[in-house]
Amino acid sequence: MDYAEVFEQYDHEIRLFIVYMKDREYSKETQKGYLHDVKHFLISLDGKSVKEVTDIDVMYYLTEVREKGAGPRYRNRCLSAIRLFYKVMVKFKVAVSNPAVEIEKAKVEKNRQPTYLQKEALDACLELVHGRHIIRDITIIALMAYAGLRVSEIVKLNVTDFDKDNSRIAVLGKGDKWRYIPLPIELNQLLQAYLASRLEPWYSKETAFFISQRRGRISKRMVQTIAEKTFTTLLEQYPQFAGKRLSAHKLRHSFATSLMQNGTDLRTVQELLGHEDISTTQIYTHVTDEVKELAMSKIHPAIPLLLESVKC
């Protein structure tokens, strides 16, 4: 079964799901992600009626997702999407019960330390950017590395979101929530330099801050490609990162880590990153532990010599 067949057989169910998410004001990113996950789940049913699905069918699909290489976080997102889908089906009496409601989420390592780049490597990233649209691409890397923007936030950024006079940008984050990020003078100047060279969009009313070669709003994939090309060059100069998964999101990790290393309190880091829950920000607290250990390693108390003979 392919996408076309899924839409043909489950058209009513999919429409109900979409209408429900819109009515409940789920963010566009969440709607897109959940719809993608549910479509693939429906494909796996191979024509089986929605009301005939059991918990075994859901577990079989989630196992298949893991066996194809997906991590526990993606597996859990699929489960959340299926749960919500069936919540909607039960609500509108398409199904009698929710087969996903009792399935447990996969364990996710909460204390995993994120991969990040130190300032030297971040600065090198900007120097290594090359290509036809070098000022645009440097600006994109800089906003992720020194202002913590997500890839999706880079894409959604509009010209009107940049306030050069007050040196700040308005960022539309997850859940369609706005946050304001003050910009260092260097970033302010860089953004102004980019705007001076910004391609003229085909559509005169296009407000996108970053314009693609096709003269439209830049895509997520293009932003990721810009980061990937930069990291490929970086690995040639910094072999210590060999084997580590470097991606555009690691620039955001690096920004957060830099804040923590500079003594920024956790609540401020949460605000700058746009995390709804501070527990998400706490993955960066390992940095403060490293700083403490380094600080303590430089302390050499003058313990009286007579204590050397004392056995504890």
Image: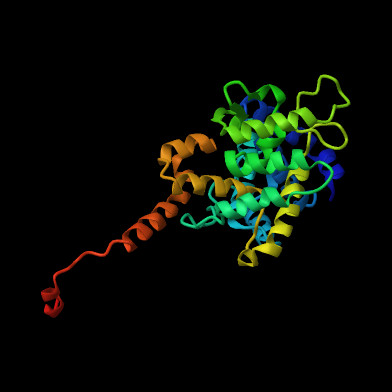
Q: Where does residue 56 sit, x and y in percent of width and height?
A: 63, 56
Would residue 101 be found to the left or right of residue 140 on screen? left
Residue at 57% across, 32% down = 183
Question: Which residue is more in the foreground, 23 or 264?
Answer: 264
Would residue 288 be found to the left or right of residue 16 on screen? left
Residue 209 visible in rendering: no
Q: Quadrant of residue 49?
A: top right
Q: Where does residue 21 sit, x and y in percent of width and height?
A: 65, 30
Residue at 71% across, 62% down = 68
Q: Quadrant of residue 198?
A: top right
The C terminus, quarter of image? bottom left
Q: Where does residue 33 sit, x and y in percent of width and height?
A: 69, 41
Residue 59 in the image: above or below residue 275: below
Would residue 303 be found to the left or right of residue 260 on screen? left
Residue at 75% across, 39% down = 135
Would residue 16 be found to the left or right of residue 291 on screen? right
Q: Where does residue 300 sit, x and y in percent of width and height?
A: 26, 65
Residue 129 in the image: above or below residue 235: above
Question: Which residue is more in the foreground, 169 or 46?
Answer: 169
Residue 131 visible in rendering: yes
